[in-house]
Amino acid sequence: MEKVKKSKGYFCTYALIACALTCAGCESLRFAPGEAQKQNAWLHNRTTLITAEAARGENASEKLQALTRLTELQSRAFTSYYGLPKEFPQADTAEDILAESNFQLARTALGESADRPDTWQVADSALELAIGICALLGGVYGTKAVGFLRTAKVKSQALREIIEGNEFFKKEHTELAGAFKEAHNDQSPQTRQIVAEMKTESNC
């Protein structure tokens, strides 16, 4: 029985750790590659391959040929990482690759790659998941963990509202920015760091 309680406690601890890792910052959070990104990665590999072949066929310098070979090799890693697309763009020749649609595809992929999930929503979802897991486990440890996580969720929401309200106030009342900053001079370094990180995440 003691072992079961311990295992439940460990599981809730792991859930908390996973939640903390999930909320580590917006730079560590990214969407899975979409179809446009997969097509672009595959097309990039085709572009580098045809470029390498053209460099050989046109008797380019050894340095240029070596660079194009290296680029083609490097691009395989991108294709492998992103995965193959469901549909493959026409890319048999240099003319196919230089089609305007492929330039548009590259711009779309670039835009999508810059997107990040909303960190607050991810944190909220992670806390909900952890609460659900600990509630299923039950017992003393599970009940304590659920209470702790629910409190953390309420505090997280409150902190978000405070930070967003402060930022709105500073934008709307720029003439009071100096006084506002002075009012927060007594914050501890730890508090300043937490608020700064959360402001950064909100702007991601």
Image (cartoon, rainbow, N blue to C red):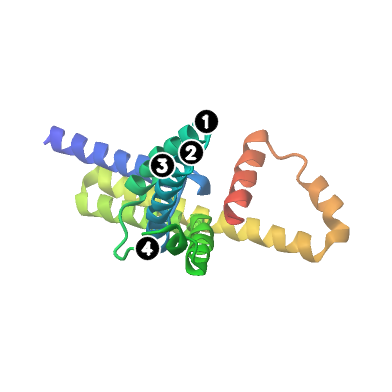
Residue 199 image position (x, y, % from top left): 63, 51
Asked if residue 183 is positioned above or below residue 39 in the image, the reply reads above
Residue occupying the point 84% across, 60% down? 174
Of the residues tagged 1 and 3, which is closer to the observer? 1
Q: Amino acid at mark 2?
A: Asn
Quarter of the figure that contains the N terminus: top left
User: What secondary structure is found at the residue carrying circle 1?
Assistant: helix
User: What secondary structure is found at the residue carrying circle 4?
Assistant: helix
Q: Residues under labels 4 and 2: Cα distance?
A: 36 Å
- Tag 4 residue: 35
In contact (CB < 8 Å): disc 4 and disc 1: no
Residue 152 image position (x, y, % from top left): 45, 50
Of the residues tagged 2 and 1, which is closer to the observer? 2
Of 66 and 23, which appears nearest the observer?
A: 66
Of the residues tagged 4 and 1, which is closer to the observer? 1
Asked if residue 27 is positioned above or below residue 84 in the image, the reply reads above
Q: Amino acid at mark 1?
A: Lys
Residue 167 image position (x, y, % from top left): 70, 58
In contact (CB < 8 Å): disc 3 and disc 4: no
Q: Which disc, if any, is residue 59?
A: 2
Q: Residues under labels 3 and 2: Cα distance?
A: 18 Å
Residue occupying the point 41% across, 56% down? 43
In the rendered structure, which disc, 3 or 4, sits on the residue that comes first in sequence? 4
Q: Residues under labels 2 and 1: Cα distance?
A: 11 Å
Of 110 and 67, which appears nearest the observer?
A: 67
In the rendered structure, which disc, 3 or 2, sits on the residue that comes first in sequence? 2
Is 166 situated left or right of 35 in this image?
right
Q: Amino acid at mark 4?
A: Glu
- Tag 1 residue: 63
- Tag 3 residue: 72
Of the residues tagged 3 and 4, which is closer to the observer? 3
In the rendered structure, which disc, 4 or 2, sits on the residue that comes first in sequence? 4
